[in-house]
Image (cartoon, grey):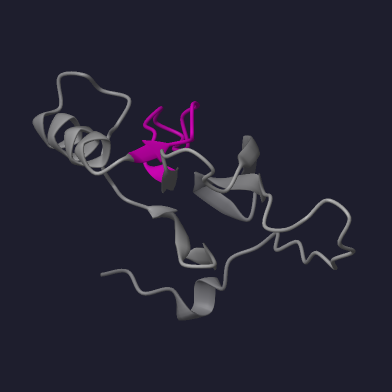
Amino acid sequence: VAERLGEPIIMGDFNIHVENPDDKFAKLFLQILEDNLWKQMVAKPTHVSGGTLDLVLKRNVPDSMPVTKTEVRFTPAVPDHALVTCNLHTGSPTEKRKFKSIEKRDLKNLDSE
């Protein structure tokens, strides 16, 4: 979860097949998002079997934090899920900020539940 002045961005493996219009859980989940003014930003499959399970969620309201360049990249480090990256525009374009790029997951401490 990332936050800018009270505005959350939620990212993670939801294990809900949002790409499948016939999946009743996906339909319900997407309806809940829409009803509560949330938008799902990942447009490509994030699992090797073709499912879109890893999501980036942002508020779908005027003046919400821009989320751009949402990308899906498969890497040998994680054989079944892709790495999802995006740009979060959190401040004034005139501000100088340092950015940290995280390219791996801590698989030793991964909670499988």
Q: Confirm whether residue 29 shows in the render.
A: yes
Q: In the displayed image of the protein, which residue is found farthest to the front? A: 62
In the current view of this chain or complex, which residue is farthest to the left? 24
For the residue pair 35 and 1, the one nearer the viewer reads as 35
Vertically, is 107 above or below 75?
A: below
Image side of residue 11 versus residue 33, left or right: right
Q: Is residue 65 left or right of residue 20?
A: right
Q: Which residues are magenta?
A: 38-55
Extreme residue in the top direction: 21
The residue at 32%/25% (across/down) is 19
Q: Which SS does the magenta portion mostly show?
A: loop
Q: On the rendered image, what quadrant is the C terminus found in?
A: bottom left
Residue 112 lies, in percent from the top left, at: 32, 69
Decide if residue 102 is on the left or right side of residue 13.
right
**Residue 85 included in the magenta stretch of the image:** no
* Residue sitting nearer the eye, 79 or 109: 109
Is residue 73 visible in the rendered image? The answer is no
Can you say whether 39 is above or below 64 in the image? above
**x and y percentages locating residue 9 in the rendered image:** 47, 56
Vertical order, 64 against 11 (above or below): above
Q: Residue at x 85, y 68 (%)?
A: 98
The residue shown at (16%, 29%) is: 27
Q: Is residue 91 left or right of residue 47?
A: right
Residue 51 point in image, percent of width and height: 36, 31
Q: Is residue 26 above or below residue 100?
A: above
| Residue 20 or residue 77, whichever sits in front | 20
Q: Residue at x 76, y 61 (%)?
A: 101
For the image, the number of numbered tags is: 0
Q: Give the quarter of the image for residue 73.
A: top right
Can you tell which quarter of the image residue 4 is in? bottom right
Queried whether the magenta region covers residue 54, the answer comes back as: yes
